[in-house]
């Protein structure tokens, strides 16, 4: 077994978890969801979901993770095997390694887009040529076309393999650099790599966001209905009629869920490196609160406000309907082109998105590293080599199959969306129904700086599983048939799912090997006894 | 922006910033537990 990893400080683990949670979705997905689902009124179901689902499930993950760590385990399969008391939950726990690994396949590519855009703005800032080729003298339609074409050519949307024709495209070189930085940070370890990086990246991200926010809130009006106040109104004016729709409540819960990284497999791994006397209740709440500052405090004020001021309500509505990528990579560059000091703020914006992405992506490699180390008994460097191999295959697949972003979208849908709900359900059932609420709450309160409210017991046992079951039922009824038809019609989509299936087989084999090794080492694989430090000296194994 | 929009925005911002500041105050004023 490799050298034991641990966090350097409480603040470090909070910022690392918050860094994992804060991502592109905070700045691009949240404002679109809010504007589409009732504006200010959306915040009612949104905050209800935060308090009743996101934070409680997060606490359950933190608790299971630390408990597993106290029993000598750091991977989701091993920890859920302990908490879930047997092989069923151990193998279901594989999802907690599969999600971060497979999401990293495409997420690091998106990270490379952000850095590529930041580099282009930096070049424009010092070189003088218009960033991304957007000519502000041209009409709005021509600017929109230029921004869309730039995005399409940068990410290789026109066809598979186009980023490799005539040598590697610039974004592929950036991807290789970003991939190497990720691996380097993770190999440096929890404290020396991930924690140290997040400790400066998170404040840097906040500073970039603050600069852009001040710039946006001090923009001059551009015609009737295009002031900052109109922009804020587009995002925040409440439409209470939307609250009557179940879709609004599901959308709010979904946004909270994906934003906080619950059911992602990262928190359970990160918390496994904490000690019994470490607080996890306040730490979990603080990391969630930090995520909310970036999402509501920055994402809710910057993106759509700037878009309305320069593009008007109609243009912004069209941009929102184009999805997060359209809003972030095609619409906002037009806004920056018109903004005084736009190249500077464009650079700050995309560099901030890059920091948001990299603090998330390093958290995606760590669970796989930990899993390979403890299941196969390899060193951290050997595990890193295996992660490089897996990441090269998976990310290589997504970068090569860039046409229409089919590979990216398919893995994002099946793994980054569906399996998150499945893993969260597995976790709350293991926590509330198998391990037991009394044992779970007792463990959560060891060393805690605050108490978990009593109502959370009810929420975790009944409300959260019910919500997740309903979400899965709605998915099976509304979306699954379409997804299956798509797999039948699209070869790249089908093969992307087969790639994920191949990863699952590999992880199953590793788990089987690991379970045998752990038993040989005398570890309590099925959670049959308390951690050694909870036993009297004469009871210890 | 309407008055209700301003109210929703203000309450939301006060809630997220207030929660974050309260949490960080508690974390940073707790006894140091650095392990290095």
Image: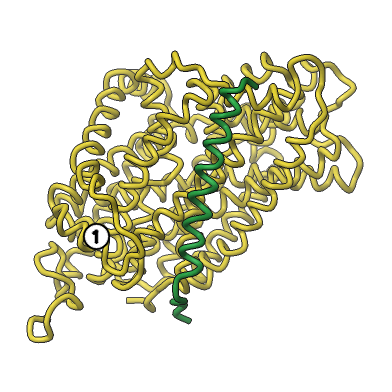
Chain colours: A yellow, B green
Tell which of A86 and A534 is nearer to you: A534
- Give the left or right position of residue A424, taking residue A204 as reference: left
Q: Residue at x 75, y 45 (%)?
A: A347
Crowd class of label 1 (few under 14; some 14 to 19; many from 20; radius 10 Å): many
Instruction: Say which of A384 and A46 sits in front.
Output: A46
- Check the residue under mark 1 and report the chain it is in: A
Residue A503 in sight = no
Q: Residue furthest bottom?
A: A538
| Position above or below: B20 against A239 | below
Name the residue that disc number 1 marks.
A79
- Count of numbered tags: 1
List x then y, in percent, for residue A322. Answer: 59, 22
When the figure is inspected, residue B9 is found, relative to residue A317, above or below; the finding is below
Q: Where does residue A516 sit, x and y in percent of width and height?
A: 16, 66
In which quarter of the view is residue A74 placed?
Answer: bottom left
Inspect this view and state whether residue A282 appears.
yes
Percent x, y of residue A113: 64, 42
Give A360 or A297, whichever is nearer the viewer: A297
Secondary structure, mark 1, is helix
Q: Name the quarter where the C terminus of chain A is drawn.
A: bottom left
Residue A309 position within the rendered picture, expressed as x and y whole percent measured from the top left: 74, 24
Q: The N terminus of chain A appears in which quarter of the rendering?
A: bottom left
């Amino acid at each position: 077994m490799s050298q034991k990893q641990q966090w350097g400080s409480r603040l470090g683990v909070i910022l690392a978890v918050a860094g994992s949670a804060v991502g592109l979705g905070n700045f691009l997905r949240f404002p679109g969801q809010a504007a589409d689902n009732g504006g200010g009124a959306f915040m009612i179901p949104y905050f209800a979901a935060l308090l009743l689902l996101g934070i409680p499930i997060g606490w359950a993950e933190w608790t299971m993770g630390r408990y597993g760590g106290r029993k000598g385990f750091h991977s989701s399969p091993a920890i859920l095997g302990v908490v879930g008391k047997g092989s069923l939950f151990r193998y279901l726990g594989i999802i907690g390694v599969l999600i971060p690994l497979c999401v990293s396949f495409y997420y690091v590519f998106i990270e490379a887009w952000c850095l590529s855009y930041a580099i282009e703005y930096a070049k424009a800032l010092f070189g003088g040529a218009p960033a991304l080729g957007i000519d502000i003298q041209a009409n709005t339609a021509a600017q929109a076309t230029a921004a869309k074409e730039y995005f399409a050519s940068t990410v290789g949307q026109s066809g598979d393999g186009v980023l490799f024709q005539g040598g590697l495209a610039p974004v592929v070189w950036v991807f290789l650099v970003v991939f190497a930085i990720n691996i380097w940070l993770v190999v440096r370890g929890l404290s020396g790599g991930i924690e140290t990086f997040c400790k400066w990246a998170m404040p840097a991200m906040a500073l970039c966001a603050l600069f852009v926010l001040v710039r946006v809130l001090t923009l001059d009006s551009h015609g009737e209905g295009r002031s900052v106040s109109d922009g804020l109104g587009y995002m925040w004016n409440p439409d209470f009629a939307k609250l009557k729709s179940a879709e609004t409540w599901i959308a709010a819960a979904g946004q909270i869920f994906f934003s906080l990284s619950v059911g992602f497999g990262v928190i359970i791994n990160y918390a496994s490196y904490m000690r019994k006397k470490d607080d996890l209740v306040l730490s979990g709440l603080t990391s969630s609160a930090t995520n909310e500052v970036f999402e509501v405090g920055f994402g809710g004020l910057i993106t759509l406000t700037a878009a309305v001021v320069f593009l008007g309500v109609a243009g912004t509505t069209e941009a929102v309907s184009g999805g997060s990528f359209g809003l972030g990579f095609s619409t906002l560059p037009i806004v920056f082109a018109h903004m005084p000091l736009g190249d500077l703020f464009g650079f700050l914006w995309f560099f901030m998105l890059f920091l948001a992405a990299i603090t998330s992506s390093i958290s995606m490699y760590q669970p796989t590293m930990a899993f390979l180390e403890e299941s196969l008994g390899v060193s951290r460097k050997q595990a890193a080599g295996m992660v490089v191999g897996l990441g090269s295959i998976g990310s290589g697949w997504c970068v090569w199959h860039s046409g229409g972003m089919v590979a990216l979208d398919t893995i994002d849908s099946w793994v980054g969306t569906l399996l998150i709900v499945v893993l969260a359900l597995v976790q709350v059932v293991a926590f509330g129904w198998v391990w037991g609420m009394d044992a779970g709450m007792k463990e959560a309160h060891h060393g805690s700086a605050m108490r978990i409210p009593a109502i959370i017991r009810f929420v975790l046992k009944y409300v959260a599983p019910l919500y997740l079951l309903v979400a899965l039922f709605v998915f099976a009824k509304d979306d699954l048939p379409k997804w299956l038809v798509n797999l039948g019609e699209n070869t790249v989509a089908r093969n992307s799912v087969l790639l994920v299936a191949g990863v699952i087989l590999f992880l199953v084999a590793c788990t089987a090997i690991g379970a045998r090794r752990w038993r040989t080492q005398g570890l309590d694989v099925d959670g049959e006894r308390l951690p050694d430090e909870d036993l009297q000296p004469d009871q210890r194994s | 922006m309407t008055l209700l929009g301003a109210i929703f925005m203000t309450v939301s911002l006060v809630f997220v910033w207030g929660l974050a500041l309260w949490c960080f105050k508690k974390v940073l004023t707790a006894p140091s537990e650095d392990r290095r």
